[in-house]
Image (tube, rainbow, N blue to C red):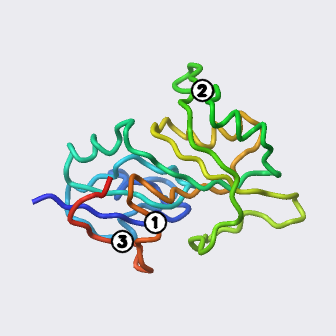
């Protein structure tokens, strides 16, 4: 029997359950927050400063299906400054980012400026205050997932990411998860 979960990965945690080694400095792992069956793996990853929806499964073929280029992943990014129409257009059409030391042009994406999202997940570390300049929010929906792609895309158009939250994978939404931060599901709705 396979197991499937959707969880909220908070800021400052690695998208794995244990390190497998003793580290000189303490990193935070999802295993510190959630108990899941042995063999459970994250489908895709969120880097340590990113947060939001993370799917977990014990089924490798399900992981491959969801990581395919057919499944949309939506992110809300808080960026430094007021994002411009020109920057949004560049993001929509694809920008050049570095991937494994090579230039890579991202695939077209769905991109739009949004107002401050309602009901943001609690974040343990404050971004910054208004004295450091304005910020704005953008929704970016991708069907690919290169290492730190959204961060690299936004930086490429001159708007570095201050906060990044994955809010949707396929039809699975971050808003489905209650305050426990984890929801067991029979299958993933994609």
Residue occupying the point 55% across, 61% down: 12
The answer to whether one can see residue 26 in this image is no
- Helix, strand or loop at label 1? It is helix
State the image quarter where residue 162 is shown: bottom right
If you read the primary sequence from the N terminus, does the residue marked by circle 1 or circle 2 appear first? 2
Task: Determine which residue is flagged by label 3.
Answer: 182
Q: Nearer the viewer, mark 1 or mark 2?
A: 1
- Quick check: 23 left or right of 99? left
Q: Nearer the viewer, mark 1 or mark 3?
A: 1
Within 10 angstroms of label 1, few (less than 14), some, or many (20 or more) residues?
A: many
Q: Distance from label 2 to label 3 (Cα)?
A: 33 Å
Q: Residue furthest top?
A: 102
Q: Residue furthest left?
A: 1
Residue occupying the point 59% across, 42% down: 150
Number of numbered discs visible in the structure rendering = 3
- In x, y percent, where is residue 90? 70, 33
Q: Are marks 1 and 3 in contact (CB under 8 Å)?
A: no
- Quick check: 89 left or right of 134? left
Task: Determine which residue is flagged by label 1.
Answer: 174
**Foreground of the two, 45 or 170:** 170
Q: Which mark is residue 98?
A: 2
- In x, y percent, where is residue 135? 79, 57
- Helix, strand or loop at label 3? It is strand
């Amino acid at each position: 029997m396979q197991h499937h979960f959707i969880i909220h990965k908070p800021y400052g945690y690695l998208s794995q359950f244990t390190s497998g080694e003793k580290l000189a400095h303490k990193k935070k792992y999802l295993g510190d927050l959630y108990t899941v069956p042995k063999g459970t793996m994250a489908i895709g990853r969120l880097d340590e400063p990113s947060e939001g929806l993370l799917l977990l499964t014990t089924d490798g073929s399900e992981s491959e299906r969801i990581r395919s280029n057919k499944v949309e992943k939506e992110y809300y990014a808080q960026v430094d400054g007021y994002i411009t129409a020109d920057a949004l257009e560049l993001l929509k059409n694809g920008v050049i980012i570095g991937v494994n030391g090579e230039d890579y042009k991202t695939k077209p994406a769905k991109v739009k400026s949004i107002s401050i999202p309602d009901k943001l997940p609690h974040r343990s570390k404050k971004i910054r205050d208004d004295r450091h300049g304005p910020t704005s929010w953008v929704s970016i929906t991708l069907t690919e997932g290169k290492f730190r792609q959204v961060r690299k895309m936004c930086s490429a158009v001159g708007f570095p990411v201050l906060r990044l939250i994955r809010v949707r994978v396929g039809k699975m939404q971050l808003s489905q998860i209650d305050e426990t931060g984890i929801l067991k599901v029979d299958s993933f709705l994609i």
